[in-house]
Image: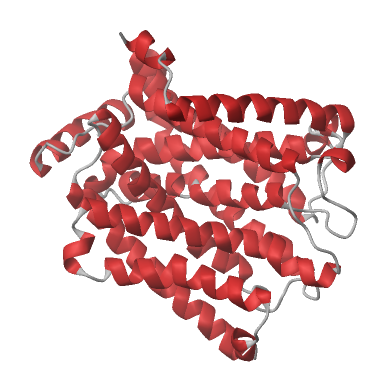
Amino acid sequence: MKTNNLFRLSFWKSVSAIVIIVGLYSIISRFALGLGWTTNLSDLVPWGLWIGFDFIGVGLAAAGFTIAATAHIFNAHKYHSIVRPAILTAYIGYIIVILLLIIDLGKPRNFWHPLVMWNPHSVMFEITWCVICYSTILTLEFAPIILEKFNLKAPIELLRKISITVIICGVLFSTLHQSSFGSLYLIAPTKVYPLWYSSYLPVHFFISCIAAGLSMIIFEAYLCARAFRQGLKVWVLSGLGKVILTVLSIELIFKFSDLLLSGKFSYLFLPIQETYFFWLEIIIGSIIPIAILSIPGYINDRKWLYFSSIFTISGFVLNRMNVSITSLVRTSGQNYTPSFYEISITLLLVVLGMWAFRLITKNFKVFETSFGQNSEAVETADLKQRELIFGK
């Protein structure tokens, strides 16, 4: 029955199949013809959709280190049940980022150079090694989900002994990675449009990714609850909503204070494209979700939490695209629109990521609790599972 359901044709499966076929064709074309033929990138616009998408993938994976640290380092039992979906989200996000980085390299065959050709003065060197190290850590954090399926107790016991060290290293490398993407644009103060350029750009990147990462957990939990009758209790999701509300409020105040103190406040009212994109990002990604989450009845409602997560994630996507594309287009003197190949390859990776999440959550124990359980039973189950994997 499960096999029949897997191959049963539906609208979204048909769309996914088309996206995958077209995306594979685009990848073959990219490697056969090169970046110049398959993208709209140039010497004046060397980074486009793919770099922006890398920023998005890494940012949405932020829940991995946030939740792991909260649950296992600060021992917040309430959030133990969402460690696994957070780690899975981060893991898939980083795999997609790595694949896209290889596709985006001018000479993909040289992807191994940073491993042996060190340049510690380069921000790109730090980013590369953070990706390598954190991906390795996510593999170790994700391994128990696979090992439990096959009842391999010895490896689980070994991972239990090193779990806290692994989690601490994960927090360290992920924090460096999230902020270092912002540092990448500090070297171009005359090219980045003033509304997005700031000496605090690494801090802005770090704060915003926390809200986006936690929103991604709410988004996934809601959809999984509808699809598989699995998910999380509202009291867990509302706890995340309160954190998101706090983080969004801090980031909004910080952003406008930064603009005011740096003398850039007047740019908020110029009738140009950059201003409109900036306000769209602020309204969708900050003001609307803050308004939703500020209402007590909404922050305790699954559906409204889901809506707020959509707005927060959308605003985050706009922010990363604005920083990586919109903020640089004016100074380049050229217009940039992603090519058919760039868009189709990006959609391919998105679809593969969604299907990977769906298949893993359906066949492995990712969501440990259901919406129907009471909070006491949830916490008891979480603690027992935590003792098995991470020790008492």
> On the picture, is 231 further left or further right than 161?
left
- Residue 379 locus on image (x, y percent): 16, 40
- Residue 79 locus on image (x, y percent): 27, 46
Visible in this render: residue 105?
A: yes
Q: What coloring was used for the rendering?
A: secondary structure
From what the image shows, is residue 389 above or below residue 72? above
| Quadrant where the image shows the N terminus | top left
Residues 129 and 14: in front is: 14
Residues 223 and 77: in front is: 223
> Residue shown at 33%/56% (left/top)?
307
> On the picture, is 332 further left or further right than 252?
right
| Quadrant where the image shows the C terminus | top left
Visible in this render: residue 183?
A: no
> Residue shown at 12%/36% (left/top)?
372
Quarter holding residue 376: top left
Residues 164 and 360: in front is: 360
Residues 354 and 136: in front is: 354
> Residue shown at 49%/72% (left/top)?
282
- Residue 65 locus on image (x, y percent): 45, 47
> On the picture, is 355 further left or further right than 383?
right
From what the image shows, is residue 130 above or below residue 116? below
- Residue 63 locus on image (x, y percent): 43, 48
Among all residues in the image, which is located at the extreme front? 11
Quarter holding residue 261: bottom right
> On the picture, is 79 further left or further right than 380?
right
